[in-house]
Image: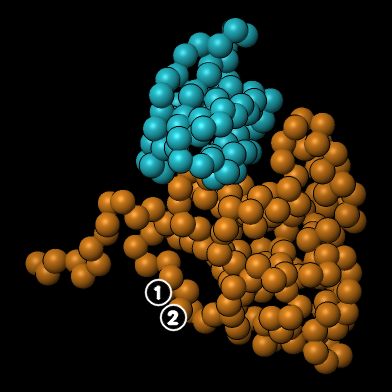
Chain colours: A cyan, B orange
Amino acid sequence: MANYKIDITKEHCPMTFVKTKIELSKLKEGDILNVLVSEGEPLENIPGSAQEQGYKVLSVSPAEVEGTHLIVIQK
Amino acid sequence: MATPSIQLDSTTKKLSIIGFSGDFDKLTAVFTLATGAAAVGYEVNLFFTFWGLDAIKIKQGRSPVGKGFLPKVFGIFMGGLRVAPVSRLNFAGISPKIFRYLMRKNNVATLEELVEAAKILGINFYACEMAMHVLGLSKEDFIPEVKDVLGVATFLKIAEGGQTLFI
């Protein structure tokens, strides 16, 4: 079971979603992806779309840098 | 009142885009919507016709692609993705270069990056049979990701039950 991380705080639409999706597609069963996102669209939409695509969203919590959040997703 | 014959499955999310324009800015809109939708779980179909076919040519510069004299002349003038003009204020091709510079500077995906993302995300590319016939183009002139050459009826079947855009 591997643990990966991706930072998309510097990305803009649609690459926020594209980069997350590409990383998610690399996961094997049980693997975890930590996605560091900015507030706004990515924070509002990534957890929901990951769930819709059959992934488990383990947590969404504020990260160290103000205005950023960590979304923890498991396949 | 008759009930609708098409029963939409609430779990099916599908976006089909008719890519008519070969303009840099409009193609950017096509590929932004397409990659964004695919990334959030939509099935995405891109149907390229007329000027839009420029976006999927293997030769991205100005090249005499096409069978016959007139199609070859058209091919040179139309060019491919790399020489796509913007729809307004093109200034003989200077504006697309400025746009690319601004996109890179502001960390926004360029058109080429979006097209590459579309390929990785498994978006379905289709080409219009009629427009190809007029322009003397064959499937071999296009990138290998182009799944099929279609007419209107097949495109409608593919797009059925989803959202369709014309750009």
Give whichever of B162, A21 is nearer the camera: A21
SS for tag 2?
helix
The residue most toward the bottom is: B68
Q: Left or right? Give the position of B14 relative to B65.
A: left
Count numbered badges in the picture. 2
Say if mark 2 contacts mark 1, CB within 8 Å.
yes
Q: Position of residue B49 (x, y in %)?
A: 62, 73
For disc 2, the chain is: B
Can you identify the residue that label 2 sits on?
A: B153
Residue at 67 percent of width and 87 percent of height: B133
Mark 2, residues whose alpha carbon is within 10 Å: few (<14), some, or many (≥20)? few
Q: Is residue B160 above or below residue B148?
A: above
Residue B157: assigned label: 1
Q: Are marks 2 and 1 on the same chain?
A: yes
- Cα distance, mark 2 to mark 1? 6 Å
Q: Quadrant of residue B150?
A: bottom right
Q: Left or right? Give the position of B43 relative to A6.
A: left
State which quarter of the image contains the N terminus of chain B. Answer: bottom left
Q: Is residue B47 above or below residue A29?
A: below
Q: Position of residue B82 (x, y in %)?
A: 83, 58
Q: Position of residue B55 (x, y in %)?
A: 72, 64
Task: Mark yes or no: residue B111 visible.
Answer: no
State which quarter of the image contains the C terminus of chain B. Answer: bottom right
Residue at 61 percent of width and 27 percent of height: A5
Give whichever of B41, B103 is nearer the camera: B41
Residue at 19 percent of width and 66 percent of height: B4
The residue type indicated by label 1 comes to: Lys
SS for tag 1?
helix
Q: Quadrant of residue B130?
A: bottom right
